[in-house]
C-alpha cells in the first residue's frame, strides 16, 4: 500500500531572504509614489474646472454671487447696480410672453435659484397660472421677485392695460396672494398710488402683512403689457424694514418695463 508523507507547511511557504528584500523595496516604492499620484490628481481637479469656467457665466447662471460682480452700476445712482432682463434670462422672456424689465439692486444682493415648477418653464408659451421670473435677496435687507400672471386670469380683453383691469384695490385683491405667499386681506393694504412712466401705467402698493410668508412688510408694483400682468414685489421682515426701508423703496421705484 502506498503511504503519504507529510511535509511541514513552513517548508512549502518558505520565502528566501532575498525575495523578502525585493518585496520590501517594491512596497516601499509603491507607498512613495502614492503621494505623488494624489498631488497630481488634486492639481488636475483644480485646473480642469478653472479652464472650463474661463468663460463668464450668464446672469441666469450666476447663483450665490453678489450681483455687483457681474451687473453694471446704475447711471442714475452708482451706489446701485442695474438688472436689465434679457430674453436668455427666463423661459417667459425667451417665449416673448413677458416684455424685458429692469430695476436696481444694492451690489451685495444675490440672485436666487427658482424651482422649475415655479419658473413657468414647463408651460410656456401658454401658462394658465402665474409664475416667478427672477428672485434676489440680501439676508440683512430683504428680497425682491418678479411674478408674471396670464392676463386671461383677470380679464378676457386682449392686450388690456392695467387701467382696464380696474382700480388699484381691485387688482391687488386678485394679485395679493402672490405678494404675501399665502393669503391676502384688504385690511393689510396701507396705501395705493398710480405712476406713469412714458405710456406705461403702474399701480403701486404698500402693505403691512404680519402673517405673510414673504415678510411682515411688502411693497408691490403692478402693470400689464401684451398678454401678461407683471408684479414686482419687495419684501422684508420687521428687522430688515427698520434698517433698509429707504433702500427697499428705491428698488421698488426703479422697476419698469
Image (cartoon, rainbow, N blue to C red):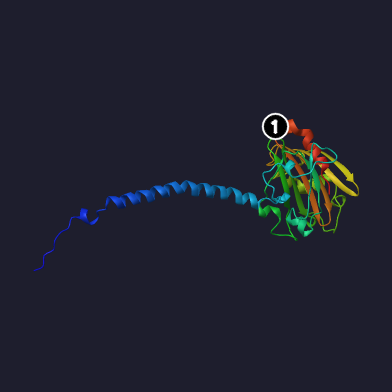
Q: Is residue 220 visible?
A: no
Is residue 149 depicted above or below 70 in this figure?
below
Instruction: Kindly tell me whether residue 248 is visible in this rendering.
Output: yes
The image shows residue 41 at horizontal and vertical percentages of 53, 50
Q: Secondary structure at mark 1?
A: helix
| The quadrant where residue 248 appears | top right
When asked about the image quadrant of residue 235, the answer is: top right
Q: Residue furthest left?
A: 1
Q: Quadrant of residue 220?
A: top right
Expressed as whole percent of the image width and height from the top left, the position of residue 48 reads 61, 51
Q: Residue furthest top?
A: 242
Can you name the residue that lies furthest to the bottom here?
Answer: 1
The residue carrying mark 1 is 239
Quadrant of the snapshot with the N terminus: bottom left
Q: Is residue 79 left or right of residue 44?
A: right
- Residue placed most toward the observer, 213 or 4: 4
Residue 114, position as x, y percentages in the image:
68, 50
Please tell me how crowded label 1 is: few (under 14), some (14-19), or many (20+) other residues with Cα within 10 Å: few
Label count reads 1
Q: Position of residue 172 (x, y in %)?
A: 79, 46
Question: Residue at left 78%, top 53%?
Answer: 86
Residue at x 39%, y 47% (from the top left corner): 28
- Residue at image location 53% in from the left, 49% down from the top: 40
In this view, the residue farthest toward the front is 18
Amino acid at each position: 500500500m502506498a503511504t503519504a508523507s507529510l511535509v511541514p507547511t513552513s517548508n512549502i511557504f518558505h520565502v528566501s531572504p532575498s525575495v523578502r528584500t525585493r518585496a520590501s523595496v517594491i512596497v516601499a516604492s509603491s507607498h512613495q509614489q502614492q503621494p505623488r499620484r494624489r498631488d497630481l490628481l488634486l492639481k488636475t481637479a483644480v485646473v480642469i474646472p478653472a479652464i472650463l469656467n474661463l468663460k463668464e457665466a450668464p446672469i441666469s447662471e450666476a447663483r450665490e454671487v453678489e450681483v455687483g460682480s457681474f451687473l453694471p452700476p446704475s447711471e442714475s445712482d452708482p451706489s446701485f447696480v442695474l438688472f436689465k432682463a434679457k430674453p436668455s434670462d427666463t423661459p417667459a422672456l425667451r417665449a416673448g410672453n413677458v416684455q424685458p424689465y429692469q430695476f436696481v439692486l444694492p451690489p451685495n444682493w444675490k440672485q436666487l435659484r427658482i424651482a422649475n415648477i415655479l419658473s413657468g418653464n414647463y408651460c410656456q408659451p401658454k401658462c394658465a397660472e402665474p409664475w416667478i421670473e427672477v428672485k434676489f435677496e440680501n439676508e440683512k435687507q430683504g428680497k425682491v421677485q418678479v411674478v408674471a400672471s396670464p392676463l386671461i386670469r383677470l380679464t378676457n380683453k386682449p392686450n388690456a392695460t392695467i387701467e382696464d383691469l380696474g382700480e388699484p384695490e381691485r387688482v391687488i385683491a386678485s394679485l395679493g396672494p402672490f405678494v404675501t405667499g399665502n393669503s391676502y386681506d384688504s385690511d393689510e393694504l396701507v396705501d395705493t398710488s398710480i405712476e406713469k412712466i412714458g405710456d406705461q401705467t403702474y399701480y403701486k402698493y404698500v402693505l403691512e402683512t404680519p402673517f405673510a410668508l414673504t415678510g411682515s412688510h411688502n411693497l408691490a408694483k403692478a402693470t400689464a403689457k401684451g398678454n401678461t400682468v407683471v408684479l414686482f414685489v419687495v419684501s422684508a421682515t420687521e428687522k430688515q424694514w427698520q434698517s433698509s426701508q429707504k433702500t427697499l423703496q428705491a428698488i421698488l421705484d426703479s422697476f419698469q418695463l
